[in-house]
Image (cartoon, helix red, strand yellow):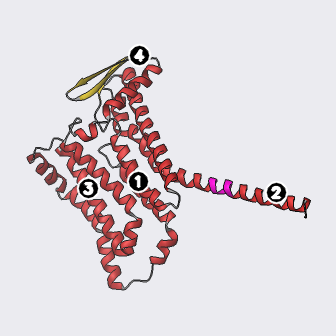
Amino acid sequence: MWKGRTFQLFFVWLVMLEFILGWEAIKLTCTKKSKAYLSAFLAVSVLPALYVIAESYSGLNSVIAKLAAQNNIYWSSSMPLAIEYLVFSALFCLIIYLYFGRNGLKGFALPALFAALVGVLYTIDNIFPYGAFTPFQLLVPTTASLAAVTLEWMGYGTVLGSESGMPTLQVTGPLGTAKFAIAWPCAGIESLLIFTAVTLLFLQRIPMSWKAKIGYFIVGAGITYLINILRIDTIFTIGMQFGVNSVQVQNFHFYYGPLYSIAWIVCYPLIIILSRMLWQKMKTGKTKEKEIKKSQQSQLNPV
């Protein structure tokens, strides 16, 4: 997931969610188009596939990586993927705008912003590696401290330190010792940023009071932050059992770990919808109950 293409699957999921939530409005815009318009639209729709062909078979990725290396970008080999996310986001916006117009672009802003954010975060980490981007690194010491506290509750010994401007955490248990430096991607700052963008855009479309929106955002952000701490705890327990340089640690760090928070983020809009539906049912039930009581009282006391 981290520096990979799994996020694109979640991008597709968000596109499907937008179609489900806004289908009634989308149907109104699906009017008949002229043949010339449809031909232009289909030509633009092919651009993402042409970009994939160019980067895979025409050496575009090699050109991007070489340019990044010439500009002293540390993770130059990861720049083609970051550019890919940004290009996909821009092309998606173009396709949506051509077919659905400006209102459609507003409706599908959520998946477009998600893909663009992933590309931006990858680019920042490529240019400023190992926590060098200090604005994102500010929250990491607190995250490391909370991870140490939770690991101590689990019975492990912990030692907090610092190396090369990054907080370090050493954890000791019956199976061994694990020590890692914690940078902002490891601390889940990217998931908090993605959560903020996705949730704010989603809540903007839901008709509810601003107090309810603030409540949903605070609860979701708090759970996202706690999930990131759980992810750090998990990687330390794996490191103690299998070793800090083991395949198990690498698999969790790059594949399974980020799935913790992203799975929560993409499920949270559905949780909001279901909770609103349940609240409306409860509210309707209470209203009906009051009406029944009033009618019963009026029958008992006709005067």
Q: Residue at the front extreme?
A: 303
Please name the amino acid that badge 3 sits on: Glu
Q: Residue at x 25, y 41 (%)?
A: 135
> Is disc 3 placed on a helix, strand or loop?
helix
Q: What stretch is highlighted in magenta?
A: 278-283
> Mark 1 and mark 2 in contact (Cβ < 8 Å)?
no
> In front of the other: label 1 or label 4?
1
- Which residue is under mark 2? 293
- Which residue is under mark 4? 175
Q: Residue at x 39, y 74 (%)?
A: 100
The picture places residue 74, in percent across and down from the top left corner, at 16, 41
Please name the amino acid that badge 2 sits on: Lys
Q: Nearer the viewer, residue 273 or 15?
A: 273
Q: Distance between the residues labelled 4 and 3?
A: 42 Å
Q: How far apart are marks 2 and 4 (CA)?
A: 64 Å
First reached walking from the N terminus: tag 4 or tag 3: 3
Q: Which of 212 and 166 is in front in this view?
A: 212
Q: Quadrant of the C terminus?
A: bottom right
- Which residue is under mark 3? 84
> In front of the other: label 1 or label 3?
1
First reached walking from the N terminus: tag 1 or tag 4: 4
Q: How many labels does the image show?
A: 4
Numbered circle sitting on residue 198: 1
First reached walking from the N terminus: tag 1 or tag 3: 3
Label 3 neighbourhood size at 10 Å, few (<14), some (14-19), many (20+)?
Answer: many
Q: Distance between the residues labelled 1 and 4?
A: 40 Å
Please name the amino acid that badge 1 sits on: Val
> Is disc 2 placed on a helix, strand or loop?
helix
> Mark 3 and mark 4 in contact (Cβ < 8 Å)?
no
Q: Residue at x 35, y 80 (%)?
A: 38
Numbered circle sitting on residue 14: none
On the picture, is 46 further left or further right than 108?
A: left
